[in-house]
Image (cartoon, rainbow, N blue to C red):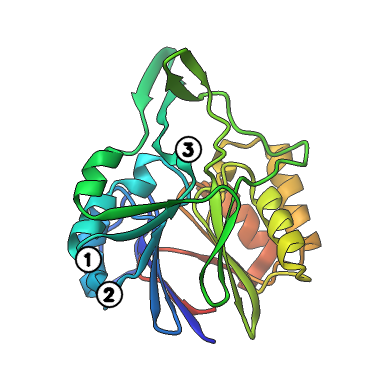
Amino acid sequence: MAVTLTILAENKVSLGMGLIGEHGFCAHLDAGGRKILWDTGQGFCLPHNAPRLGVDLKQVEVIALSHGHFDHTGGLAHALAARGGGEVVCHPACFERKKARRNLFGRVVEVSIGMPASRSQLKELGGEFNFEEDSKELAPGVHFFTSIPMNNDYEEIEPGFLVDTPEGERPDLLPDDAALAVVTDRGVSVILGCAHRGIVNTLTHIRSRLDCDGFYSVWGGTHMVDRSTEAVAAEIAALHELKVNMIATAHCTGFQNEMKLAAAFGERFAFACVGARAEL
């Protein structure tokens, strides 16, 4: 079965197509006629870019979320309104009260980074939430994986991610971090959101679950931007060991790290920018 991937929201934009970009991520998959929306960006790109890329949001049958941050869920209300509600697959931790604390130029800044709309607001728009803490097949050959195990010593979640609870704040370990795995005749392709729990951890988990020997392609955000030089080097080495054929990065990878990936993968590296389209 052929699966077509189209990038609808991302930080970078293809030339000459009248598209816009934003800090966020959203992709559309056509899996043998079953339409899947993977994340929704902040919400600026989705209504603008979808019609220009031939994506009819009314035909989307399921929305899946990679995690509960605003730059991946901000367009969810628009997507639900456009299609008159429908199924949303995500980890229940997506609705936790997420925030980030950063030291910017010597000043500590704290901002809310969780889902902009509440669960009740989204339910009023027809959202039917299917909470998943392991895996789910969204379409034949399209698998949703979450609760990614963290089994190496170089991919860590930065301490600035926090969750507010009635008992006080605690570190956000991002249990809701998720990825899609698409199985076609070409092999297994993985579409990430941010890979907060690590691109290597994610691919290793998917490899063990699908019993695959390598990956045809990997797309999306890698969150290498917040990792040390040594950690990024270890990740790139592991990507070769995992037999990644092609990688197209987006959003939270960081330009310097994308240049390192381009050097490591050569012509097998690409930017997963807005307007990119591929047959998986």
Please report the residue visible at 45 percent of the width from the left and 50 percent of the height from the top: 90
- Looking at the rendered structure, the number of numbered marks drawn on it comes to 3
Q: Give the numbered dot on residue 59.
A: 2
Q: Quadrant of residue 6?
A: bottom left
- Indicate whether 41 appears above or below 31: above
Q: Residue 259's spot in the image, x, y percent?
A: 59, 55
Q: Residues within 10 Å of mark 1 (few under 14, many from 20)?
A: some
Q: Amino acid at mark 3?
A: Ala
Q: Where the N terminus falls, by quadrant?
A: bottom right
Lateral position of residue 183 relative to residue 100, left or right? right
Q: Where the C terminus falls, by quadrant?
A: bottom right
Q: Residues within 10 Å of mark 3 (few under 14, many from 20)?
A: some
Q: Is residue 269 visible?
A: yes
- Disc nearer the start of the sequence (3/1): 1
Asked if disc 2 and disc 1 are in contact, CB closer than 8 Å, the reply is: yes
Q: Give the numbered dot on residue 128.
A: none
Q: Quadrant of residue 27?
A: bottom left
Q: Amino acid at mark 2?
A: Gln
Q: Amino acid at mark 1?
A: Arg
Q: Quadrant of residue 205?
A: bottom right
Label 2 to label 3: alpha-carbon separation: 27 Å
Lateral position of residue 141 relative to residue 38, left or right? right
Which residue is disc 1 drawn over? 83
Lateral position of residue 127 relative to residue 95, left or right? left
Q: Give the numbered dot on residue 93.
A: 3
- Disc nearer the start of the sequence (2/1): 2
Please report the residue visible at 42 percent of the width from the left and 32 percent of the height from the top: 96
Please report the residue visible at 76 percent of the width from the left and 60 percent of the height from the top: 208
Label 2 to label 1: alpha-carbon separation: 7 Å
Asked if disc 2 and disc 3 are in contact, CB closer than 8 Å, the reply is: no
Secondary structure, mark 1, is helix
- Indicate whether 184 appears above or below 212: below
